[in-house]
Image (tube, helix red, strand yellow):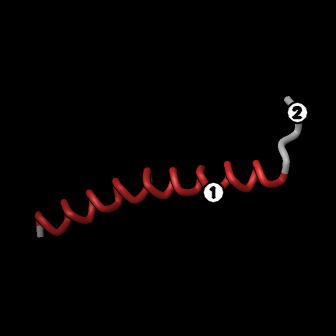
Amino acid sequence: MAPLKLREISVYGVLVVIFAAILFSEPLALAKNFEAAFQ
């Protein structure tokens, strides 16, 4: 693999962070909704 340029690394890093934030925020939001529904 050719080494990535700093700009490419930052772009991919931002995309990964956003993707991870969406993946982790969805279950958390669903869990909070379930907790509120059962209380």
Q: Secondary structure at mark 2?
A: loop
Give the image location of residue 23, x and y in percent.
43, 50
Determine the residue located farthest toward the right in the rendered image: 3
Identified at 27% across, 59% down, the residue is: 31
Q: Which mark is residue 2?
A: 2
Packing grade of label 1 (10 A; few <14, some 14-19, many >=20) is few
Q: Which mark is residue 28?
A: none
Q: Which mark is residue 14?
A: 1
Q: Secondary structure at mark 1?
A: helix
**Label 1, label 2: how far apart the Cα atoms are:** 20 Å
Give the image location of residue 30, x and y in percent.
26, 57
Q: Using residue 4 as the reference point, say whether residue 17 is left or right of it.
A: left
Identified at 63% across, 57% down, the residue is: 14
Mark earlier in primary sequence (1, 2): 2
Q: Amino acid at mark 1?
A: Val
Q: Amino acid at mark 2?
A: Ala
Which part of the image, by quadrant, shows the N terminus? top right
Packing grade of label 2 (10 A; few <14, some 14-19, many >=20) is few
Identified at 73% across, 56% down, the residue is: 10
Using the image as rendered, state which of residue 19 and residue 38 is in the foreground: 19
